[in-house]
Amino acid sequence: MRKILFLFLLTLSLYVFAAPGAQANSGSIAATVNEDAISMSDVEDRATLVIRTSGMPDNEEVRTSLRPRILDALVEEQLKMQEAKRLEVVVEQAEIDEGFTQLAQQNNASAEQFRAMISGAGINLNTMYRQIRSQIAWGKVIQQTVRPRITVTDADVEDAMARLRENLGKNEYRVAEIFLPLESSANASDTHKLAFKLASDMQAGKVPFFRVAQQFSKSAGAAQGGDLGWIQQGQLSADLENTIAAMAVEQVSQPIKTQAGYHILMLREKRTMSEDTMPSKEGVIATIGTQRMERMQRRQLMDLKAAAFIETRV
């Protein structure tokens, strides 16, 4: 058996959300997460940022549909920071500065130009710095607690390579995904409405798929605009694969409900799988490891959520 070390890559984007402070900033309390509070102003600030970056209309109907999902995201952020604090994870100022510089580069700007862009958009710089800190901290938590448990055996690789060879001559698809989980019956209606609203807006060309994925998706490729890479037969559930097979390139699907939640797909490219396009052994190892790390880190977050005292007031 061979243990593979996978680097948890922190990918940052301009389209991040504003993070709440450890205590509520002002106004009424929207939620309490163990010893920390999230204020309604935190929720509204994030709603404003989502709306501005996605191009969605700024009206009460849109804000009402966003608030449950935004509040859930803020709760998860608090849990991540609390776990980092418990594990005595340290984030140096130099790391935050580097994260900010990466953001600037992704937006074709210098750090100073990027600061001006953020200020011009009405976003508090300290809020963005806190967001960068929380992402770096969670990345370190995953490196410390999840990565050592990730193993990929020779048998895993051989099985995956054998399945790939069976698909030679068949179509394979480069797919992007937006995944909205159904984490409780309480949020089922809101998640349903949001999924169909987002799909409708993207199909009408009102909002770009990659921005919506970065802001809303809980899938592994969210930071990369939902990109899942090349998908071969047998990698996804039958419902998802059947939908993809019937799609045209650049088409956005209707939301597909599974037991886990709603999936919105976009077909980016299609080709016939051949020896030339078949991934290398190293690529297969990386894919298996990334998939397992994603599942385990998501499970860890859900465990933190289940064990926490969370009281929502909206």
Image (cartoon, rainbow, N blue to C red):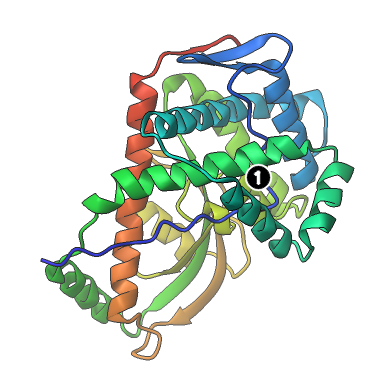
Count of marks placed on residues: 1
Q: Is 163 placed left or right of 101 in the picture? A: left
Q: Quadrant of the N terminus?
A: bottom left
Q: Percent from the top left, x then y, of residue 37?
A: 57, 15
Q: Is residue 216 at all visible to an observer of this figure?
A: no
Q: Is residue 29 above or below residue 143?
A: above
- Pointer 1: residues within 10 angstroms few (<14), some, or many (20+)? some
Q: Is residue 100 above or below residue 39?
A: below
> Element at badge 1?
loop
Q: Quadrant of the C terminus?
A: top right
Task: Residue type at mark 1: give it.
Answer: Val
Near-viewer residue (251 or 278): 278
Q: Percent from the top left, x then y, of residue 61?
A: 76, 25
- Residue drawn at point x = 34 percent, y = 66 percent: 287
Residue found at the far bottom of this picture: 276
The image quarter in which residue 230 lies: bottom left
Q: Is 171 placed left or right of 111 in the picture? A: left
Near-viewer residue (108 or 170): 108
Residue found at the far right of this picture: 120
Which residue matches tag 1? 16
The image quarter in which residue 48 lies: top right
Near-viewer residue (307 or 258): 307
- Residue drawn at point x = 25 percent, y = 52 percent: 148
Q: Percent from the top left, x then y, of residue 134?
A: 54, 39
Q: Is 200 placed left or right of 240 in the picture? A: right
Q: Is residue 93 above or below residue 275?
A: above
